[in-house]
Amino acid sequence: MIQEDLEHKEMLKLIQIKVKSSAQAQQIQSILPLKQKLAFIYYDNGFYELYNIKQQVITQKGQISQNIRFFLEIYTNVLIFHDPIDFQMKFLDLNMNQINPKFVLNQGTKQTL
């Protein structure tokens, strides 16, 4: 019981980090904490970076559409997002650093997974 409480406190610990990014962006659009002590940083021009909190380094970089409003981690290192350009729900696989074309959900079509 005490060990579980310590783990929860460790998970909720607030930390301050400084990230030096090479992405040509003016501001951060969103930061999404991920499993395995990672953070997904999405910039205003569509660039994103995967930041390792424990090692304090950027591990991956990429670019997707601009003006994405939300991201959700549905599996470990797999995000789903709504692409405002073609109005599709897409899966971004951070393990391969690319959008998975087999799991693109079109607007208004019935999908079964």
Image (cartoon, helix red, strand yellow):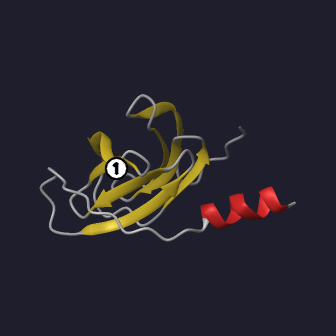
Q: Residue 72, how many percent across, how many down?
A: 55, 56
Q: Nearer the viewer, residue 14 or 62?
A: 14
Q: For residue 15, which quarter of the picture?
A: bottom left
User: Is residue 99 placed above or below 45 in the rendered structure?
Assistant: above
x, y percentage for residue 67? 31, 64
Q: x, y percentage for residue 99? A: 41, 36
- Describe the element under mark 1 as helix, strand or loop: loop
Image side of residue 35 versus residue 87, left or right: right
In the depicted view, which residue is nearer to us: 37 or 75?
A: 37
Front position in the image: 77 or 68: 77
**Compared to 13, does 100 lie above or below?**
above
Q: Residue 23 appears at what percent x and percent y?
A: 16, 52
10 Å crowding of disc 1: few (<14), some (14-19), many (20+):
few
Q: Looking at the rendering, in which quadrant would you find the N terminus?
A: bottom right
Instruction: Give the residue at mark 1.
Output: 56
Residue at 71% from the left image edge and 62% from the top image edge: 6
Question: In this view of the protein, which residue sits in the foreground, 64 or 31?
Answer: 31
- In this view, the residue farthest toward the right is 1
Tell me which amino acid carries mark 1: Gln
- Determine the residue positioned at 40% across, 63% down: 31
**Would residue 14 be found to the left or right of residue 9 on screen?**
left
